Amino acid sequence: MITLYFVLFSSLFFILVVGASLSLLFKREIVIQRRTAHYLGIEEGRLKLQKKKNQGDNKIRLLLKKFSDKVKVVIDQKIPSSRKKELEKRLREAGYPLKLSPIDFRFLQFLIGSVLFFVIYVLLGKADANIFSTTLLAGVVAALGMYYPSFYLSVIIKKRRFKIQKMMPDFFDMVNLSIEAGMGLDASLIKVCNQTKGPLSEEFLQTIEDMKLGKSRREAFADLRSRVPVPQFQSIITSLIQADLLGVGMAKILRQLTERIREQRTQLAREQAMKAPVKMIFPMMLFIFPAIFIVLLGPLVIYFIQSGL
């Protein structure tokens, strides 16, 4: 291994030395060639070729965009409004990944399904398979491919909810400290959101923007509660709305709420710990117990075989 490293480093050193030596020897010729290319317009020709290539790429992009726009119009006409609202809600809960609208998301599903269908059909067609089985298998793979973005969106929603639950105690503790220091609720939220990054900060920044556009604090918090379907978070926002209506001090309310959040997290951790032994049964039965039986009973089985029993 040491010999291999020595050979590699020696080769690299030799290449660098030879390259530096050649560049010093032919430095004058290299400068003359660059100036000649500049005066004869060789670089301009290259730029023109690159410009033509970019124009060709732009034409292809325009054609693809026109085709995608037509497909999106057809998809928009076919999808009912209820499905659009449901998909819009899921995308909003996921934080709008890739800034996709409901129509863009359906177009992505259609594109993935079409590409997979075409690829599987061509591959199996070259293998001289039956047309019916080829079409059936390609259709199944295309259906799975179309379902995958929806499944991935569900995973993103679940992860985002977990991040919000994890951020809540520290986030509201910082807001509480800012309020106790003399800042208002809105200013405290803006300060904490600018200092922390995550889905919870993004949601509160969106709420602040809604209030700047003319919504009252009650309406903006109600929209925030509907956007984030986390029970603990919704209870906190409901308490903040009630405290704002009744004129109760926000610092006291937030202190009590953060204590309750931490208690709920402790109870949730205990619940997950109690579920762990039950979840470990199936991996132990499938992977651990067979290995133990092989180690313990294997020699006995070999002894019986050798003894002729």
Image (cartoon, grey):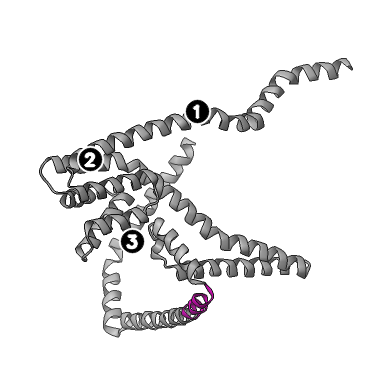
Dominant secondary structure of the residues highlighted in magenta in the image: helix
Look at the image and tell me whether residue 31 can be seen. Answer: yes
* Looking at the image, residue 265 lies above or below residue 171: above
288 is higher (above) or lower (below) than 58 = above
Pick the front one: 142 or 219 = 219
Circle 3 is placed at which residue position? Answer: 22
User: The residue under label 1 is which amino acid type?
Assistant: Met
- Rendered image quadrant of residue 97: bottom left
Q: Which residue is mark 2?
A: 253
Magenta region includes residue 248: no
Q: Residue at x 14, y 49 (%)?
A: 184
Is residue 72 highlighted in magenta? yes
Query: Measured from the top left, where is residue 45 in percent x and y?
Result: 35, 83
Q: Which residues are magenta?
A: 68-79
What separation in Å lies between label 3 and label 1 (alpha carbons)? Answer: 72 Å
In-front residue for pair 256/165: 256
- x, y (%) of residue 95? 38, 57
Instruction: State which quadrant residue 24 falls in.
Output: bottom left
Amino acid carrying mark 3 in the image: Leu
| Residue of label 1 | 274
